Image: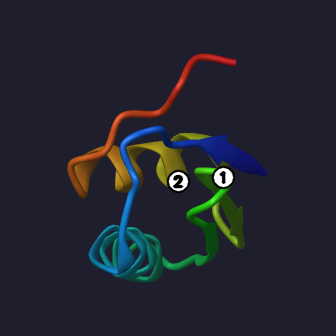
Amino acid sequence: MTFTVPGMSCGHCKAAIEAAIADAGGRATVDLAAKTVTVQDLDQARAAEAIRAAGYEIAAA
């Protein structure tokens, strides 16, 4: 699944989100230019929770 995370802007953002998803047991692919995070191996609720816990808001679909 893919989330839009408008607050991402740099390598630190990318690393923080990737680490949060990994800590939750998933894998993330971050595209800073598109401001998207594609998550594998986690359900949607856990993935969203991990992104928010890292300090980022998810845009409404």
Residue 7 lies in what quarter of the image? top left
Q: Which of 41 and 5 is in front in this view?
A: 5
Determine whether label 2 and label 1 are within 8 Å by CB. yes
Asked whether, in this view, residue 10 is left or right of residue 32, the answer is left
Query: Which residue is pictured at 59% across the width and 50% down the height?
Result: 35
Image spot of residue 14 (x, y percent): 42, 73
Q: Which residue carries the number 1 mark?
A: 43
Question: Relative to 42, does residue 2 appear above or below in the rendering?
Answer: above
Q: Is mark 2 on a helix, strand or loop?
A: helix
Residue 53: percent from left, percent from top: 24, 51
What residue is drawn where x is 50% and y is 79%? 25
On the rendered structure, is 9 left or right of 43? left
Q: Which residue appears farthest toward the top when viewing the image?
A: 60
Nearer to the camera, 12 or 18: 12
Q: Dot 1 surroundings within 10 Å: few (below 14), some, or many (20 or more)?
A: few
The residue positioned 36% from the left and 34% from the top of the image is: 57
**Residue 1 appears left or right of 26:** right
Residue pointed to by mark 2: 47
Query: Residue at point 38% right, 45% down?
Result: 49
**Mark 1: amino acid:** Asp
Name the disc covering residue 5, or none: none
Quadrant in which the C terminus is drawn: top right
